[in-house]
Structures are given as C-alpha cells and as structure tokens.
Image (spheres, helix red, strand yellow):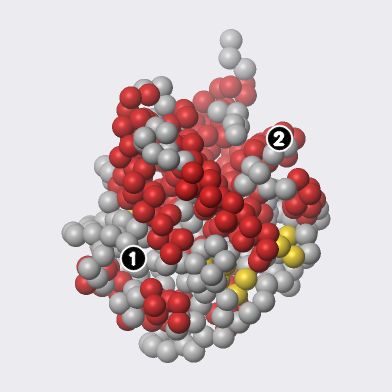
Amino acid sequence: MESRAAVDDAALGREAWAVLDANWTGSATVPAPGLYPHQWNWDSTFVAIGLARRDTRRAGTELLSLMAGQWGNGMVPHIVFQPVRAEVYFPGPSVWRSREHRSAPHGVGTSGLTQPPLQALALWRIWRHAADRDTAAALVRRLYPMLVAQHDYLATVRDLGGAGLAAIVHPWESGMDDSPVWDAPLEALPVTGAPYRRAGGSCGEGRPGGHHDPFVTLALRYRDSGYDPAYLRDEHPFAVEDPMFNGIWLASCQALAELAPVAGADAGPHRAAVERIRAGLLERLWADGLFRVRDLRGGGLSQVCTVGCFGPLLDRELPADRVAELVGVLESARFMGAAGYPVPSCEIRAQQFDRSRYWRGPSWVNTNWLLRRAAAVHDLAGLARILGASTLRLVRQAGFRECFDPFDGSGRGSRDFSWSAALTLDLLADTVEE
C-alpha cells in the first residue's frame, strides 16, 4: 500500500503536469496564462530543466523553440514572441523592432536583450537523464554549436569590463527585474519619453508602471543604437557585472565541457572559460564575504545583498573557504535564519527589503532550485534537503505561484506559473546530482 506522502506527491505531480499542459503552445511553454503570453528565455529553460527527468523530447523541444530566436551574432533573446496576441504584452515586437536588424532571425519576432545563459546546463541535465540515449545525443549535436555561439557572444560583445565577465545592459537581462541592486544604476539615468503602463506580474502592490520608466528608456536607447556593440561599450549608461548571471554562465561552461565529447568537439575552450570567469568573479566581485554586483558606469560594488550574490556557488570548484563564507551568510538571520520559507530575494535586514514587492523580498522556486543545486555540488546534503523540502512546502500550501511571501508562505504574483510547476517535478524526484 502506498504511503500518504507518496499519494500526495503523485497528486502534486499531476497538478504540475496539468499546469504545464495548459501553458503549452505546441512548441513552447508560456510562463503564465494571460499575463505572459510569449516565450521567455529563463522561464523556458527552467521548464526544460524540470522536464529533463520526465520527457526528453518535450524538454528538447522547449530549448529548440527558444534557440529558434537566436540572433546571428549568437545572442539568445530574453523574449521570443508568439505571433498570436503579439502586441498584447508591452513592450512587444513593435517596440523592439528586431526584424529591422540584420542579425535577427528571419520571421521570428524577439526582444533585443538576453538573459542568464542557463541553456547548456539544461541540455546537460536532459542528456544525463535521458532514457533514449540516441535521441539525447542527437539533441546535443544539434544544440551544441548554438550554445557555443551564445557563449562566444557573451565573451566578446558583453565583456564590457575587460576582465572576463559578461555585463548585463538592462535589469531585465538579470531575470530578477526589480531587484534593489539596480536602484543606484537606474537612478543615475536621464529618463525621457511618454508615460506608459508596463505589463508584468506583481507580488503584491505591483511592479512599477504608469510613469516615465528608466526600464523602457534603456531598452529604447539600445534599440535606437541599432543594437550596436560599440554603443554598449562606449555610451550605454547601464552596464553591470552580476554574480548570478556570471555564476550561471560558469556552470553552463562546465556543462559544455562535459557535452563537448558527445558533439565531437574539444572541451578545452570551455574549461579555459571556466577559469577565466572564476578569476573574474573572485577578483572583481568578491568583498566582505559575498559576491556583489559591480556597476561599471557608476563605479564600485553594490552594498545591497540579494539572492543573486550566491550565484557563484554553482561553481563546483569554487574555493572551499569562499563556499563556507557564502553558506554562512545564506543560513544566517540575514536570509534563511529569519525567514519561514527560503530564500528571500533580498537580505531581510536591508532597508530595501519588502516582502510584497517583486524581487525585493519574496521567495522564488527558481532561485531556490539553483541554490539547492549549488548545495548539492558542494556536498552540502543537509542544506540541499532543507531547500528542497521547504520549496515543496510552499507549492503544496499556496500552489504554483510566481513567488511567495518568505514569512508566511502565501502565494504572490501569477497563478499556475510554469517554472514553479516544472521545477516541482524535479524536486519531487528527491535526488540531486552533481
């Protein structure tokens, strides 16, 4: 006879599948019904990760659909627009005007920005878990050159600091749009243009909207440059080295090194990239026991500590003393030690902490999943168990919400959120591998 826990897990798994099926377009999974009607880079990649243990073909289709939006210069956009209801979401294709750019894909509308390069890690997980090895190997061979081009783009066009790290040029590229670490760089911007209302989920009182917004100012300035790399290097007012973005990039380089033999390629360049990114993280972003955001325009490191500061823990070869310091902060009253549900997206004691505002306090399934993986690669089994069990407790209590109150666990933002459902499937497997 099955235990009550097994029955409950099976029911939760069925509910997660129902969400993913409802949000499936036939080629991709939208983040949430109604509010987010297109394919988002980070979201689809987390969906592929969640499906890796369960459905190799659909996980692969998710990545292939996203990579159909890849630009000729290697950039993987943060939004690939669905033709239906293309202009319902703002900013839509008419704002980005990607089709006017010679590097953009023909017949596919996209944004002009990117997001954390998680795709190689997702592909590695699909390869690792696939029962059909031939199908998985064919997927690796197909995607591998696209991912190499993506990484080459980051190493050339986005190394704005000249030290081996990729810079993001808009908060939307971080995946953590309204994090308080962007406040200072954004406050320095000249804001022009007409008021508008930006679509987007809220975790309570809502996202900024209905006013002159620096987010749109940045996007339009980059667009009006013709998405010119020289403009990014010399003129664009927002350029930030983010530890989460670069920690994910490093982990994806490690994944590419392991996938290279499957694709018949040399792993050496990927191993060299790992060393370069690690050196940049340690030399440029480490201060006072944490990795911090570096503002390349305003100068200096952010003093705001967020969940993004732990991104380099994804590096399985991060020096042990740095791992110990980071885990000490993560488990302290600044984060997990004072919250009922891990992991707050901003340090609880920070002036900017707000348990109800988007990325300024709430807990998210995707960042919890990343930190759970980080704990596992460093053999921190106890921390990994806590992160997994606490995240499942959130979705059991409040459903597959976009984010959650870190104190009482109540759901916030969109309902039936795809990455929350997909990563729940992975967490229910109850195993974590290196």
Q: Which residue is mark 1?
A: 111
Element assignment for label 2: loop
Eyeballing the image, is 139 above or below 406?
above
Please say whether residue 31 is visible from this viewpoint: no
Measuring from the top left, give residue 207's x and y in whole percent. 51, 70
Which residue is found at the position 32% from the left and 62% from the top? 73
Which residue is found at the position 68% from the left and 59% from the top? 282
Q: Quadrant of residue 114?
A: bottom left
Q: Which residue is mark 2?
A: 379
Amino acid type, callout 2: Asp
Element assignment for label 1: loop
Amino acid type, callout 1: Ser
Q: Quadrant of the N terminus?
A: top right
Q: Quadrant of residue 345?
A: bottom right
Distance of label 2 from label 1 (alpha carbons): 39 Å
Measuring from the top left, give residue 4's x and y in whole percent. 62, 21
